[in-house]
Image (cartoon, helix red, strand yellow):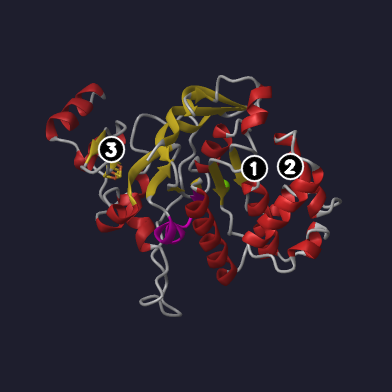
Amino acid sequence: AKVVLEVKDLKTYFKTDAGIVKAVDGVSFTLHEGETLGIVGESGSGKSVTNLSIMRLIPSPPGKIVGGEALFDGVDIFKVTEKEMRGIRGKKISMIFQDPMTSLNPFLRISTQMVETIRLHEKDVSKQDALKRSIDMLKLVGIPSAEKRIQNYPHQFSGGMRQRVMIAMALSCNAQVLVADEPTTALDVTIQAQILELIDKLSTKMGTAVILITHDLGVVAGMCDHVCVMYAGKIVEKAATDDLYARPSHPYTEGLIKSVPRMDTTKKGNRLFSIEGQPPNVIDLPPCCPFHPRCHKAMEVCRHAYPPVKDLGAGHEVACWLFADEAAKAQALKEANV
Ligand code: SF4
Ligand code: MG
């Protein structure tokens, strides 16, 4: 399939009083047409900053994209003007967030907001045609009595229905990429499943590539083709979803998989496995594997150098010293003067 977005060595840093926060530090991935890519990690891992960087929505200052490129249709979106970016953001690359109320205007009818969104990006579409397309989109996302409901205000919809409206809006301009940042976290479990299924169905139907950002590896299993696991601003493991579950290789990924609740084995009262310790503060991190304080397999070298990326085959990559050869470890220790 055609590559729609290629992110190479993205670095996004924030200046704080305490020092430079390397929120995203050398992230690379490729997204193909119709593919769903999961970006998984705890809060503070850099997954949302990755998303906001791609959308060029990093608040600056204090944030800044200090390195890397994001090739969309062969154009580096970090280099285009803000005016050109406005033609991409919300049209070619659309977003949906955890809380639709933050992106819907509470004082405007859904009809007005959807028609405006379409006409903002496609100036020659008449109001009537835009309204018709909006109603069709609402039907497509499963809003009953769409013709009537489109005249309602956002607060007249339930949380799940509002998220459907957001998806309809996001896809109404035929986006090539849909970025969904924790789209279902605020919803109850049944509704969550329905919304994820809807995104999945629509992306297949419309050929839209999806980046799904989540802290929940369980969400990824049902829906993503590929997964990037992020920790402390870096991708620590990357693989096809099946492959990641079949041979989770980074100790952090193993921990994440163990902490996914399972219908069959997780009974009431059984505590879920959880990864002990806190994610690191990414200010002035010394050279090391940032997971080492929480890793039960940590070795001496892990405390002194960031692990090299190892390709395990079939595009399965892992950044962990367990997979490096002895010579590389010895060299790293020597360089660290240990
Ligand atoms: Fe654990 Fe070392 Fe691998 Fe980091 S590099 S995950 S500390 S074994
Ligand atoms: Mg987030």
- At x 19% / y 24%, what residue is drawn? 334
User: Residues under labels 1 and 2: Cα distance?
Assistant: 8 Å
Kindly tell me whether residue 214 is visible in this rendering.
no
Secondary structure of the residue carrying numbered label 3:
helix
Task: State the residue position of label 3.
Answer: 302
Give residue 173's mark.
1
- At x 80% / y 61%, what residue is drawn? 155
Q: Is residue 102 left or right of residue 177?
A: right
Residue 53: % across, % down: 56, 32
Q: Is residue 184 left or right of residue 263?
A: right
> The C terminus is located in which quarter?
top left
> The N terminus is located in which quarter?
top left
Q: Earlier in the sequence, mark 1 or mark 3?
A: 1
Q: Would you call the spot at circle 2 few (<14 residues within 10 Å), some (14-19), or many (20 or more)?
A: some
Which is nearer the eye, 44 or 80? 80
Task: State the residue position of label 2.
Answer: 117
Secondary structure of the residue carrying numbered label 1:
loop
The residue segment tinted magenta is 212-223
- At x 47% / y 25%, what residue is drawn? 74
Q: Amino acid at mark 1?
A: Cys
Residue 112: % across, % down: 82, 48
Queried on whether the Cβ of the residue with tag 3 lies below 8 angstroms from ligand 1, the answer reads: yes
| Dot 1 and dot 2 residues touching (CB under 8 Å) | yes
Q: Is residue 32 left or right of residue 210?
A: left
